[in-house]
Image (spheres, helix red, strand yellow):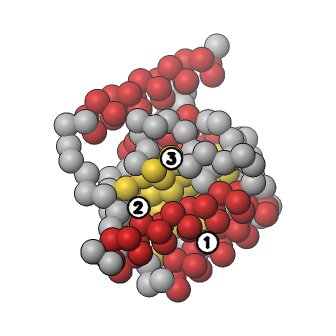
Amino acid sequence: MRKTIQSFFLKTSIFKFLNKKNRFVFKPFRTFSKTKKIGIIFNAYKKENIELIRHFIEYFKAKGVSSEALGFINQNKMKDFNLASLNIDYFNLKDCNFLGYPNSDNVNNFTSEKFDIIINLSDEENLMYDYIVSRSSARFRIGKSNINLYDLVLNLKTNELKDYITEVIFYLDLISKNNESQ
């Protein structure tokens, strides 16, 4: 019953955002040279995901773009490897209120950042990720589902984070190259 109530409120909140989004014109992603900050949301339950995110952050750093990541642990307890580090913060189910809304400093700080791009790299279906993306003021949104919420939706045959990161890099580079040549 509680999950149903939480799901209802998260979906309603995302739907309200989508109605507001249609009233505004968002500037699309142009090039890495004009991108200053990228936000990344990911499933932090798996230790190997954290390493992949660290490499992804290093990739953006080499391009001259700062990035921050927010990992979600879909449990009440953090794992031993979920220690906050440089550019990566975490939250879990204990950081959510009764209605399912995340209510922690890490989430509030992340959603208040002025990202040029926000990337949802989660490999699980959970409205929490879409809710955070909808609260972000990012100009360009990348995700796997919800075509109304994301500006770039990538559908992969595999559910591997490594493959998804490779596709994101490919398309961001492709968009960048096409826009720099104009």
Q: Is label 1 in a helix, a strand or a loop?
A: helix
Location of residue 59 (image quadrant): bottom right
Above or below, 67 against 129 in this view is: below
Would residue 2 be found to the left or right of residue 110 on screen? right
Q: Which-is-in-front pick, marks 3 and 1?
A: 3
Q: Name the element at disc 2.
A: strand
Residue 160 at x, y percent in the picture: 75, 54
Q: Look at 48% across and 83% down and name the residue there.
A: 63
Q: Residues within 10 Å of mark 3 (few under 14, many from 20)?
A: some
Q: Which residue is mark 2?
A: 117
Decide which of 3, 39 is in the foreground and name it. Answer: 39
Residue type highlighted by circle 2: Ile
Task: Kindly identify the amino acid type of the residue bearing the numbered disc 3.
Answer: Val
Give the amino acid at mark 1: Phe
Give the camera-side residue of 153 and 81: 153
Instruction: Provide the residue designation for mark 3.
Output: 153
Upstream in sequence: badge 3 or badge 1: 1
Q: Residue 11, position in %: x, y?
A: 47, 26
Residue at image point 55% right, 24% down: 6
- The reply to whether callout 2 and callout 3 are in contact (CB within 8 Å) is no
Q: What is the count of numbered marks?
A: 3
Task: Give the number of the disc on residue 96.
Answer: none
Residue 15: image location, x then y, percent? 38, 27
Q: Is residue 134 left or right of residue 123?
A: left
Read off the residue under disc 1: 56
Q: Earlier in the sequence, mark 2 or mark 3?
A: 2
